[in-house]
Amino acid sequence: MNLKEVLDWRYTTKKFDPTKKISEVDMTQVKNLLRMSPSSVNLQPWHFIIAETPEGKARIAKGTQGFFHFNEPKVTNASAVVLFCSKIDVDEDYYQHIADTEDKSGRFPNEDIKNGFLGAVKAFANIHKYDLKDQQHWMEKQVYLNIGGFLLGVATLGIDATPMEGIDVKALDEEFGLREKGFTALVAVSLGYRAESDFNSTEKTPKARLSQDEIFSIV
């Protein structure tokens, strides 16, 4: 499929076929999509909990109880579910960890360039921590950038996806001990293959978007 075909094909899947599973080869690519996502100053302020077993999906389904019960089948019937989590805070040790990781990858030809990069990371992080006072929100935006690329990326593999903000993040934080580890849950994305009976599929319900004239200003 070319890009237009991928964009036309993908949609928010409402009903998965529980008999269809994502191959191990494709799951490797799914995980690479998560890891290779861009982020501001390469901060990578995220963690991903990936559930591929019935037991793992049942744990994530604990975040779909009560008010969010309508999302439970989208978790339990999916082939896999990714819980996107954001860091709660970052500090000097984490900045150094990012710089050291880049250094080991061979990105810095000398120590001066490494120190320049480290200074840039601290500068941007401190702008959001002290000046704008939105550091956690800034990190969450990096996670959402990852989610956007992820949804398109899995579609190129022919994998359906359902992003869900309709989850009990507190319950999931407690289930996986996320806050103690410095993270909090944001969004769950279920992966798998659409059921033929899914009412929301693009074969049954054409996509609707605002016109180009309304959303584009060409200057």
Image (cartoon, rainbow, N blue to C red):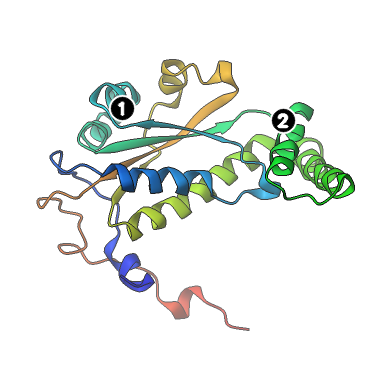
Q: Quadrant of the C terminus?
A: bottom right
Percent of width and height locating residue 199: 15, 53
Residue at which label 1 appears: 64
| Residue 32 shows in this picture | yes
- Please give left or right for residue 180 compared with residue 62 in the image: right
Residue at which label 2 appears: 94
Percent of width and height locating residue 37: 54, 50
Q: What residue is at 26 percent from the left and 27 percent from the top?
A: 53
Classify mark 2: residues with Cα within 10 Å, few (<14), some (14-19) or many (20+). Answer: few
Percent of width and height locating residue 116: 86, 48
Q: Nearer the viewer, residue 104 or 124?
A: 104
Instruction: Identify the mark nearer the N-term, 1 or 2.
Output: 1
Q: Nearer the viewer, residue 8 or 134?
A: 8
In terms of secondary structure, where does tag 1 sit? helix
Q: What residue is at 26 percent from the left and 21 percent from the top?
A: 55
Q: Nearer the viewer, residue 201 or 218?
A: 201
Specify the farthest residue to the left: 197
| Residue 162 shows in this picture | no
**Cβ–Cβ under 8 Å for marks 1 and 2:** no
Q: What residue is at 75 percent from the left and 35 percent from the top?
A: 95
